[in-house]
Image (cartoon, helix red, strand yellow):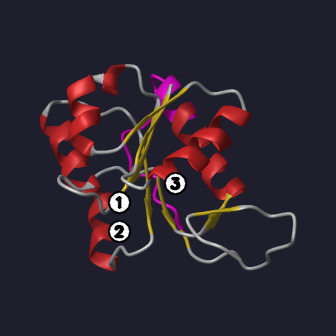
């Protein structure tokens, strides 16, 4: 299962639709608190998590999961407003990817696939695999974006 935590309903809906379209089961949450209350971290093989949320932020959720002894789920951070310090903080604590909004579908799906592979590989190293994707270099009319318009 892929869990999505974003406080913008249209972003959750768009991400959920995209991830479902390639065959994954998806649950979405409007807040970090609701994700924690539902207790879905054990079922989640990839957490797509916005950095800036109402209430508890994504970095705080990452910290709390680590305090609970939860190395998994692998986290793909998304943000339209993150600072370099936030990106660095997420990276040093094991983020699989950090995508800046708007990002293209393939960037997100590649990060999800990497996360799923990492979660399923029991021998996966506990080393941070950090990716930072800025604006896509080339965008065609057929590219879809999440979190922004072209």
Q: Residue furthest front?
A: 9
Check residue 11 in the rendering and tell me which mark sits there, or answer none.
3
Q: Nearer the viewer, residue 136 or 25?
A: 25
Q: Are marks 2 and 1 in contact (CB under 8 Å)?
A: yes
Label 1 or label 3, whichever comes before in sequence order: 3
* Residue 59: x %, y % from top left: 25, 56
**Residue in the image at 52% along x and 54% along y:** 11
Q: Secondary structure at mark 1?
A: helix
Q: Secondary structure at mark 3?
A: helix
Check residue 91 in the rendering and tell me which mark sits there, or answer none.
1
**Residue in the image at 29% along x and 69% along y:** 86
Check residue 55 in the rendering and tell me which mark sits there, or answer none.
none
Check residue 87 in the rendering and tell me which mark sits there, or answer none.
2
Q: Is residue 96 left or right of residue 52?
A: right
Residue 3's place in the image compared with 42, above or below, is: below
In 3D space, how far apart are the residues under numbered discs 1 and 3 (Cα atoms)? 23 Å
Region rendered in magenta: 117-132
Q: Which quadrant of the view contains residue 87? A: bottom left
* Residue 95: x %, y % from top left: 39, 52
In 3D space, how far apart are the residues under numbered discs 2 and 1 (Cα atoms)? 6 Å
Q: Secondary structure at mark 2?
A: helix
Q: Which quadrant of the view contains residue 146? A: bottom right
Quarter occupied by the C terminus: bottom right
**Residue in the image at 18% along x and 54% along y:** 55
Badge 2 density bin: few <14, some 14–19, many ≥20, Cα 10 Å? many
């Amino acid at each position: 299962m892929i869990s999505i935590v974003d406080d913008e309903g249209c972003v959750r809906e768009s991400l959920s639709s995209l991830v479902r379209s390639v065959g994954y089961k998806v649950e979405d949450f409007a807040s970090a608190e609701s994700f924690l209350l539902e207790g879905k971290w054990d079922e989640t093989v990839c957490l797509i998590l916005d950095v800036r949320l109402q209430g508890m932020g994504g970095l705080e959720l990452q910290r709390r999961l680590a305090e609970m002894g939860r190395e998994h789920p692998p986290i793909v951070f998304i943000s339209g407003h993150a600072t370099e310090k936030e990106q660095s903080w997420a990276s040093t604590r094991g983020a699989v990817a950090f995508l800046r909004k708007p990002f293209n579908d393939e960037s997100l799906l590649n990060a999800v696939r990497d996360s799923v592979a990492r979660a399923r590989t029991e021998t996966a190293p506990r080393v941070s695999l950090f990716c930072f994707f800025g604006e896509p270099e080339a965008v065609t009319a057929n590219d879809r974006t999440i979190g922004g318009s072209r």
